[in-house]
Amino acid sequence: MNNIELISYVIVGLIPLIYFIIYIMTQLKRKKNKRNYLYGFIVAIVIALILFVIRLFIFTMSPLKKYIPTETSTTTSGDITTKEGDTTTKTTEKKSTTKKTTKATNDYNYDKILTPTGGEVVGKTPKGYEVKLVDGIYYVDGYLVANKTYDLPETYSPGKLNSTVNEAANKMFAAAKSEKGFNLYVASGFRSYSTQKSIYNRYVNNDGQKKADTYSARPGYSEHQTGLAFDVCDRNVGACITSGFDNTNQAKWLSENAYKYGFILRYVKGKDNETGYMYESWHFRYVGTELAEKLYNNGNWITMEDYFGLTSSYDSKPIGE
Ligand SMILES: [Zn+2]
């Protein structure tokens, strides 16, 4: 539980308690009988229940929790019947049809994604890196790429964080704990196509598609679906998967040290036009220490898109298509 949540619970508890005490005091002055105390107690419970419901409402609807489920995932607006939702569905379906013919097999080796073998070379990036399509997934210079241009097959579902990634994350969290006393944890790791779909749809419903696209991936386009990326939070920091995390010591430490464990800050501040997403101080992607150090660039993070020469836009086609 974070601090803000704790305060909200204190308010929920304190207000009825104060009411009850005041009530008892006035009753004592009037010297009324015991039944009135029971009445005051019941009213206090009712007040507590009402406050609890209000609290629940605020915490599920507030901007604070806004990004938690969605964020960098994939999108598809299936179930939602708004105009925007329909548009999204059409776009996504069109795209996945193309994919089904050119790529896609359901026979994935999820451990292979860090060192892909086989597949076919489909082209080169403007910066000279080889683009390969392996089982419907794009690899650039051997690194899996998932962004607004390079999508993933709907059927691709490792079900959890890759074990190498998980191990590296635990090492990083242990270092953060011993160096700084931080209590970091994976708040959102692997997300399936369908999870991303419901998350994105919710954002589209709340904010409209244009806005939602700046912070949440359409289904099939989320890095979370790869099992190589996660959102990190700290048990002692209230802001979790929100911009409130940006200026924390935790975010600073992660930005300066993640590369040592093979992670990159994926959505760099001020580089929305490259990555396709707003700055996310909490989203980290595993690429291994070699590339991570290059992208870290002595503290001046370079994006994968810039480094490899890739686009990230729903209007662009993948190289080779
Ligand atoms: Zn994320």
Image: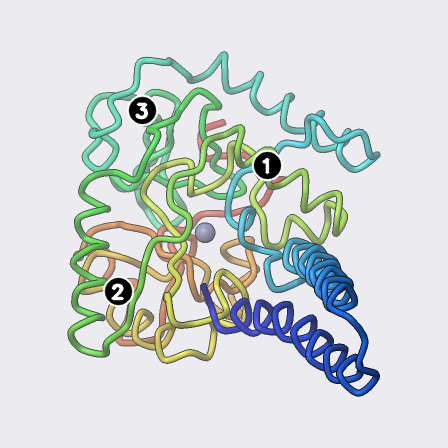
Cα distance in 3D space between marks 1 and 3: 22 Å
Asked whether, in this view, residue 74 is left or right of residue 137, the answer is right
Q: Which residue is mark 1?
A: 75
Q: How many numbered circles are shown? A: 3
Sequence order check, earlier mark of 1 and 2: 1
Q: Amino acid at mark 3?
A: Val
Q: Residue at x 75, y 83 (%)?
A: 28
Q: Which mark is residue 84?
A: none
Q: Amino acid at mark 1?
A: Thr
Badge 3 crowding class, 10 Å Cα cut-off, few under 14, some 14 to 19, many 20 or more, is: many
Give residue 137's position: percent from left, percent from top.
Answer: 37, 28
Sequence order check, earlier mark of 2 and 3: 3
Tell which of 96 and 75 is nearer to you: 75
Badge 2 crowding class, 10 Å Cα cut-off, few under 14, some 14 to 19, many 20 or more, is: many
Q: Which residue is mark 3?
A: 134
Q: Residue at x 73, y 45 (%)?
A: 209
Give residue 139's position: percent from left, percent from top.
Answer: 32, 36
Q: Secondary structure at mark 3?
A: strand
Q: Which residue is mark 2?
A: 258
